[in-house]
């Protein structure tokens, strides 16, 4: 301050000599008020205004300025000296901070309470079922500093059936407590589940296109320990399955299931894994009506796996081997042993990838409670990916036979497929896919050929921009193609035009409106049918808190080219009441039913039904705790949250868009940023309500995907969440080999 004062005064001395006397007087007075600072002593200093006025009146301008300089020098502040805050002040601040901490505790908490009520009517063939259902869903999550993340989920449902053959009332409950990311030591993390859970396998087992080892529903306990170079899973519980509406509940089955598994890397490129299951008191689902229905089975199963991965400058090599062994003992101490082997390998070089595989399984092979069909086969797949084009082929030959206790029928199946797509320019692309199937069913070990069946499905599309909005033309042709399980094979073709009518110019509250128009020619029966197809889908935000969406599609009631018949569609709405409360509802008509058994060698069955349903819900959702933590990874420098809603569905035509005849998939785990997990409901839908703003990765847990389906190119989805907005996400699954 001293140096600054001297330099300032000397700079103005020349100006003072030439200024008018009145100006000088005013300037000096102001300068005294501005520059004169009190000395920092223990006593408060007071500006000596009397001496200032006397100086102005008695001195010449030059003398006054000299006097002012002396005064500034004498009043220069002393050097800075730290002051210690009084203890009483510290005590006061501590009390204030303590009160704030009590009001907002450490650890983020997320809680959801939802109740639903609904009505449904289902007609399948000559059977009709009416039902009323109601239920409550609870979800509570808590982050702790040193004990991992705790989650408690509870579902309860009541459903009254009034069916053609019976009337029943059922209560279902499901309670699960999870503790994830618990530090056991500096390098070991534990994930533990108690209640209604599913069996797990170590991640060392590669995703296999023929068999799934986990996902058996039990009521028990399971854990996973993950270290730097190992992984251990273990659990036990009472067998059961999930059933009921509006929320799935646990229904017990006979028998118990215990599992244990281990995996670790061996060297730089190899990992090995082992998994053991013990199931007892099982009903033999292979018994005929004349067999002893009281026969119970005990099954011990063992799986050994090995993975090899190596990446070089120009190639990536992957290989996996899976060995299966089971030993089954019935109530009469009869023992049956069986083995199976699956070998897969792939090499990716540049833009191309080749994959080959062989498999073989003996009769009476089981894993846990599931029976695996006796079969032998091989496959080859070729894929090529470029920036603007992609293509691929798939060929598989398989021979399967019935279980020895029943029949030695043999089924030989040959399937082949090819697909290609090309991006003409930005927003314009073409693509096509073709699937061919040929099956021969032989009776009694080849004595007589009972039947042969050939089928084909061709899909071609063009996607472009019309008036700056997405437009797509699809052609589907079927020849003896089994579209649904409970209907004749379909033969015919369909031409469709899909059009978006609203431009993508919204970042939040984005409205949607699209239409489908087409004509179908069904030649499945002797009489050829020609009928129109039409559909509409949309979503509109009445305001920031209220959205309405829906879809409607028409197909012929007697046609076989689609899963649904007649009118099919839904209308849904949701309104944000504020303070975490929301209310919504939905009306659905004629939705295709999907029966999923994701354990092993199983295909989801799509059945055609006539369904009518309606439901409404009331939801309360809130957060508490500090620091505030939403789900997902936080982006640096960004604040606020949005949400992600989506659908996992069977993408039959591989165009990435959900059609009216492509049903959703229940009980699939959706993973956000390799951490937060949710499970799809009975319609394949999921909801992540509180997600950090920014870029996120959404993927599917491969162990929960039903076979023989897979994620396209095994790639996760990259999504961007905007503040106070909902990101709609569609996650398609492609059928392996098509």
Image (spheres, rainbow, N blue to C red):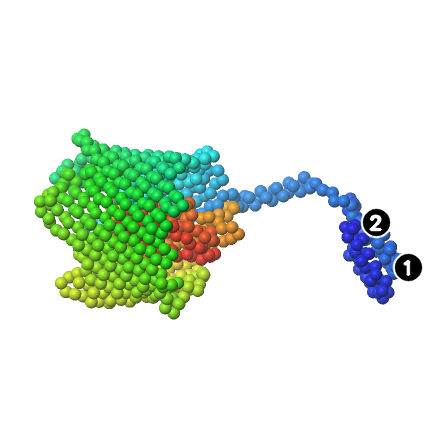
Looking at the picture, does residue 541 appear above or below residue 90? below
Of the image marks 2 and 1, the number of the one nearer the N terminus = 1
- Of all residues shown, which one is farthest toward the bottom? 467
Between 477 and 82, the one lying in front of the other is 477
- Secondary structure under the numbered disc 1 in the rendered image: helix
Label 2 Cα crowd, 10 Å radius (few <14 / some 14-19 / many 20+): few
The structure residue drawn at horizontal position 17% and vertical position 36%, both measured from the top left corner, is: 294
User: Which numbered disc covers residue 74?
Assistant: 2
Are the residues flagged by discs 2 and 1 in contact, CB closer than 8 Å?
Answer: no
User: Which numbered disc covers residue 213?
Assistant: none
Picture quadrant of residue 488: bottom left
Residue 426 image offset from top left, x and y in percent: 39, 63
Picture quadrant of residue 325: top left
Residue 675 in sight from this viewpoint: yes
- Secondary structure under the numbered disc 2 in the rendered image: helix
- Tell me the distance, in whole angstroms, between the alpha carbons under discs 2 and 1: 20 Å
Residue 161 image offset from top left, x and y in percent: 25, 51
The structure residue drawn at horizontal position 81% and vertical position 56%, both measured from the top left corner, is: 9
Residue 195 image offset from top left, x and y in percent: 35, 39
Describe residue 687's horizontal placement relative to residue 398 as left or right.
Answer: right
Q: Name the residue under label 1.
A: 58
Looking at the picture, does residue 628 appear above or below residue 221? below
The structure residue drawn at horizontal position 37% and vertical position 50%, both measured from the top left corner, is: 350
- Of all residues shown, which one is farthest toward the right? 58
Q: Nearer the viewer, mark 2 or mark 1?
A: 2
- Of all residues shown, which one is farthest toward the front? 314
Residue 158 in sight from this viewpoint: no
Describe residue 296's horizontal placement relative to residue 350 as left or right.
Answer: left
């Amino acid at each position: 301050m001293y140096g600054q004062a001297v330099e300032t005064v000397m700079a103005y001395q020349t100006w003072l000599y030439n200024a008018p006397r009145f100006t000088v007087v005013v300037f000096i007075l102001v300068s005294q008020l501005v520059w004169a600072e009190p000395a920092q002593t223990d006593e408060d200093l007071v500006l000596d205004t009397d001496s200032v006025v006397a100086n102005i009146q008695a001195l010449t301008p030059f003398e006054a300025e000299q006097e002012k300089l002396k005064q500034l020098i004498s009043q220069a502040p002393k050097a800075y000296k730290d002051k210690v805050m009084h203890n009483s002040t510290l005590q006061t601040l501590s009390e204030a901070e303590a009160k704030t901490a009590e009001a907002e505790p450490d650890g983020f908490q997320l809680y959801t309470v939802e109740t639903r009520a609904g009505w449904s009517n289902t007609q399948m063939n000559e059977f009709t079922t009416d039902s009323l259902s109601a239920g409550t869903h609870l979800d509570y999550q808590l982050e702790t500093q040193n004990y991992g993340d705790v989650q408690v989920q509870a579902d309860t449902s009541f459903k009254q059936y009034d069916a053609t053959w019976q009337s029943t009332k059922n209560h279902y409950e499901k309670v699960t407590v999870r503790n994830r990311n618990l530090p056991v030591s500096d390098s070991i993390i534990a994930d533990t589940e108690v209640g209604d859970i599913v069996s797990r396998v170590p991640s060392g087992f590669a995703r296999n296109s023929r068999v799934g080892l986990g996902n058996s529903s039990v009521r028990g306990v399971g854990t996973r320990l993950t270290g730097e170079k190992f992984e251990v899973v273990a659990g036990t519980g009472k067998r059961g399955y999930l059933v009921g509406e509006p929320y799935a509940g646990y229904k017990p089955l006979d028998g118990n299931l215990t599992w244990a598994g281990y995996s670790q890397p061996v060297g730089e490129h190899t990992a090995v894994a082992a998994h053991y299951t013990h199931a007892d008191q099982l009903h033999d689902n292979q018994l005929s009506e004349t067999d002893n229905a009281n026969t119970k089975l005990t099954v011990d199963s063992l799986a050994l796996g090995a993975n090899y991965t190596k990446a070089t400058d120009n190639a990536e090599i992957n290989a996996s081997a899976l060995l299966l062994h089971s030993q089954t003992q019935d109530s009469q101490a009869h023992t049956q042993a069986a083995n199976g082997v699956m070998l897969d390998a792939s090499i990716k070089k540049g833009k191309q990838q080749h994959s080959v595989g062989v498999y073989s399984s003996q009769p009476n092979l089981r894993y846990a409670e599931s029976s695996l069909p006796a079969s032998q086969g091989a496959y080859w797949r070729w894929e090529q990916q470029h920036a603007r084009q992609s293509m691929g082929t798939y060929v598989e030959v398989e021979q399967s036979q019935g279980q020895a206790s029943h029949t030695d029928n043999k089924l030989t199946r040959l399937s082949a497929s090819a697909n290609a797509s090309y991006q003409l320019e930005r927003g314009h692309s073409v693509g096509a896919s073709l699937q061919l199937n040929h099956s021969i069913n032989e009776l009694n070990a080849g004595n007589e050929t009972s039947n042969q069946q050939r089928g084909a499905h061709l899909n071609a599309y063009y996607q472009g921009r019309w008036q700056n909005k997405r437009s797509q033309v699809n052609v589907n042709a079927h020849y003896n193609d089994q579209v649904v399980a409970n209907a004749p094979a379909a033969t015919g073709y369909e031409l469709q035009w899909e059009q978006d009518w609203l431009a993508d110019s919204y970042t939040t509250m984005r409205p949607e409106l699209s239409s489908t128009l087409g004509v179908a020619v069904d030649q499945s029966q002797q009489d050829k049918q020609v009928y129109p197809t039409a559909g509409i889908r949309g979503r509109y935000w009445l305001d920031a808190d209220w959205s309405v969406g829906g879809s409607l599609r028409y197909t012929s009631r007697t046609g076989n080219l689609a899963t649904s018949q007649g009118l099919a569609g839904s209308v849904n709405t949701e309104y944000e009441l504020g303070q975490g409360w929301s209310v919504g509802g939905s009306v659905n008509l004629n939705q295709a039913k999907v029966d999923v058994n994701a354990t092993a060698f199983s295909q989801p069955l799509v059945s055609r039904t006539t369904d009518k349903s309606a439901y409404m819900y009331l939801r309360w959702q809130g957060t508490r705790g500090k620091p505030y933590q939403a789900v997902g990874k936080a982006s640096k420098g960004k604040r606020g949250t949005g949400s992600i809603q989506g659908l996992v569905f069977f993408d039959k035509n591989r165009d990435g868009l959900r059609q009216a005849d492509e049903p959703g998939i229940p009980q699939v785990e959706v993973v956000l940023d390799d951490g937060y997990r949710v499970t799809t409901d009975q319609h394949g839908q999921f909801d992540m309500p509180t997600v950090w703003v920014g870029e996120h990765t959404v993927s599917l847990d491969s162990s929960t995907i039903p076979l023989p389906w897979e994620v396209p190119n095994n790639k996760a989805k990259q999504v961007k969440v905007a503040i106070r907005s909902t990101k709609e996400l569609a996650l398609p699954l492609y059928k392996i080999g098509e």
